Amino acid sequence: MKADKNLLSGSTTLLVLSLLSTGDKYGYEMIAELDERSDHTFTLKEGTLYPILHGLEKEGAVKSYTKEADTGRTRKYYRITRKGLKALEEQKKEWVEFSEKVNAILAGCAPALA
Amino acid sequence: MKADKNLLSGSTTLLVLSLLSTGDKYGYEMIAELDERSDHTFTLKEGTLYPILHGLEKEGAVKSYTKEADTGRTRKYYRITRKGLKALEEQKKEWVEFSEKVNAILAGCAPALA
DNA sequence: TAATATACCTCGAAGCTCTAGGTATGTCAA
DNA sequence: TTGACATACCTAGAGCTTCGAGGTATATTA
């Protein structure tokens, strides 16, 4: 499980932007959706996600607004910007190249021990 | 480029063990081989690799021995152990699962902006 | 003989995530 | 109505990983 945590490092922004590309979402919702859609592999902690969202907003990749839910509770929604979409495309491309190269290295390694 | 650095995080040990599974190697050699086989995507720094090798040796995943090269220069070779091979298999499996899940999330995201 | 490449090493800075705390509100059961 | 729990947001500091920058030493080559 520890390895997963480290692997996750570096792809969290990509995952968050990817989520937001399908529609506006609020923080708590993103954590639940990522956790569910990854079968509990990507279980972002709040202490991880919120700073990331603040950072993305500061660099203009997302914009936030508050909206009241049916429950009466106030939520802070995030919407991806054009700039964010461009960043998403770029990071997606980097991820594909990266993963292909890791797979190429792994393909060249010896098979499992008997 | 920054993203690559972060993506690399967490997969370095996997890559190093993978290299060693094809034969004994010394540090400087691993750096060059990884760099070349990845088209300069995985350019491990010495300050990164040597501490990793020391850590792997401490936990019994590799063993080191010195050997004199034809040039007369002394090199420190590393050999992967049975324990290291098991770790490699495990990390390989984790990587495959992880990358598949990232791809699944990405597949669900909106297409590129026009 | 001086510069460069090889080959090893360590320390402190920087970046990212997590842990652990805090605040506040809505829901539901006792 | 009150206490527990889930929802929903936030931050500060610890921990882990990589990198940058430096150091040491030897072989090659100009």
Image (cartoon, coloured by chain):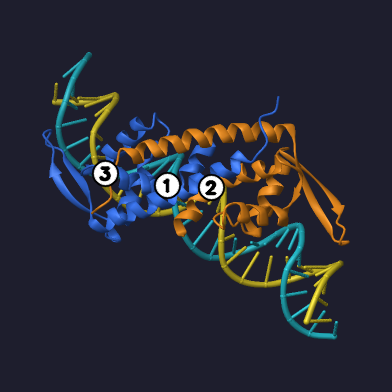
Chain colours: A blue, B orange, C cyan, D yellow
- Residue at 50%, 38% in the rendered image: A4
Q: Quadrant of the C terminus of chain B?
A: bottom left
- Chain for mark 2? A
**Chain identity of mark 3:** B
The crowding category of the residue bearing disc 1, from other C-alpha atoms within 10 Å (few below 14, some 14 to 19, many at least 20), is many
Q: Are marks 1 and 3 in contact (CB under 8 Å)?
A: no
Residue in the foreground of this view, choosing between B18 and A7: B18
The reply to the same-chain question for discs 2 and 3 is: no
Label 1 vs label 2, nearer the camera = 2
Label 1 vs 2, first from the N-terminus: 1
Quarter location, residue A109: top right
Which residue in the protein does label 2 denote? A101
Q: Mark 2 near mark 3, Cβ–Cβ under 8 Å?
A: no
Residue assigned mark 1: A11
Task: Give the CA separation, mark 1 to mark 3.
Answer: 17 Å
Closest to the observer, A9 or B114: B114
| Residue in the picture at 57% in, 35% down | B92
Crowd around label 3: few <14 · some 14–19 · many ≥20 (10 Å): some
- Location of residue A5 in the rendering, given as x and y in whole percent from the top left corner: 49, 40
Q: Toward which corner of the image does residue B59 lie, by quadrant?
A: top right
Per the image, label 2 sits on a secondary structure element best described as helix
> Mark 2 is on which residue type?
Lys
As shown in the figure, which amino acid type bears the numbered disc 3?
Ala
